[in-house]
Amino acid sequence: MLDLGCGSGRDCYLLSRLVGETGKVIGVDMTDEQLAVARSHLDWHAQRYGYSRANVEFLSGHIEDLNTVGIADNSIDVVVSNCVVNLSPDKRKVFAEIFRVLNPGGELFFSDVYADRRIPSNLKFDPVLLGECLGGALYWEDFRRIMHDLGCPDIRIVKQNPITLDDPEVSDKIGMINFRSITVRAFKMPLEDRCEDFGQIAIYKGTLSEYLHAFDLDDHHHLETGRPLRVCGNTADMLSASRYGRHFQMIGDKSVHFGLFDCAPPNTSTRLESGAACC
């Protein structure tokens, strides 16, 4: 797993426990002072988790160029990031690097701040707004277009919440824009830009230890253990051709096409009540 903008390493050490002793976690950050703090806890966490040695590595570099820290093509299973991409001056390059390093079938799972319109140029570099993770927030539709251009036409919203502007100084500057904190899941695999119906059925086996009774792919795909669910071709691929494959039974293939799946087009809006993909 790869954590972009790992800071002092808190998320990396949580991931360290999740991947187990034989897994590996890489944290990348540009702030050497924070990395020094992160590295100081390597042995403590290895001992606490009962590992023979640390399975976490911290690298100093920029998330726009992961080549410089030696992360190879198709070498990462999962990329995570927690409210960091909005701080990058070249977000398209960040996402391009993510899809370069992900293995086929790999997953991007991250949270960030998004805006309901493009940020005016005079506010993008305002130090107060940058510090609040607002000045660099992507307009959701621009994010969707970047992902589409990079070969990912179907991104899934896992959860989202509105961000309130409680500071009068911040509200006075940028209160005309609505912001949301959104957690996104995306996969490196060939997907269609619409939800197509091939008559496929997904059945969750209940074999993920943290999700015995149900698994949520996104904010509108709730798969109860043992209960068949109609899914579009994209959802079928996400569940069967990713790290989740062994936890699902898939019925049907893509030999017969029945037209569009009966739901809204993917990612037409950031509103919770909209259909981000199959309903």
Image: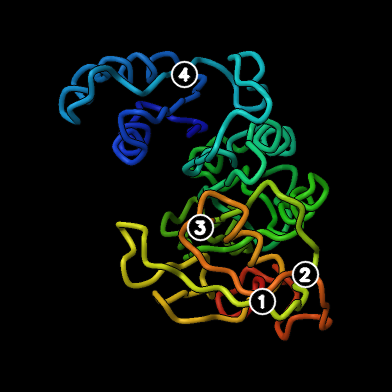
Query: What amino acid is labelled 4 in the image?
Result: Thr
Q: Which residue is mark 2?
A: 254
| Residue at the image position 18 percent from the left and 21 percent from the top | 44
Regarding mark 4 in the picture, which secondary structure is present there?
loop
Q: Earlier in the sequence, mark 2 or mark 3?
A: 3
Label 1, label 2: how many angstroms apart (C-alpha)?
8 Å
Q: Indicate which label's residue lies in the foreground, 3 or 1.
A: 1
Spatial separation of the CA atoms under disc 3 and disc 1: 32 Å
Taking 260 as reference, is 133 left or right? left
Query: Mark number for residue 200?
Result: 1
Give the crowd class for mark 4: few <14, some 14-19, many >=20 residues within 10 Å: some
Q: Is residue 117 above or below residue 64?
A: below
Closer to the camera, 42 or 136? 42
CA distance separating discs 3 and 4: 24 Å
3D distance between C-alphas at marks 2 and 3: 35 Å
Label 1 secondary element = strand
Q: Pick whichever, 15 or 115, lies toward us.
A: 15
Residue 56, relative to residue 195: is it above or below? above
Question: Label for residue 181?
Answer: 3
Q: Nearer the viewer, mark 4 or mark 1?
A: 1
Is disc 1 in contact with disc 2, using a CB cutoff of under 8 Å? Answer: yes
Q: Position of residue 5 (x, y in %)?
A: 49, 31
Q: SS of the residue at dot 2?
A: loop
Q: Which residue appears at 84% of the width and 82% of the height? A: 259
Amino acid residing under circle 3 = Ser
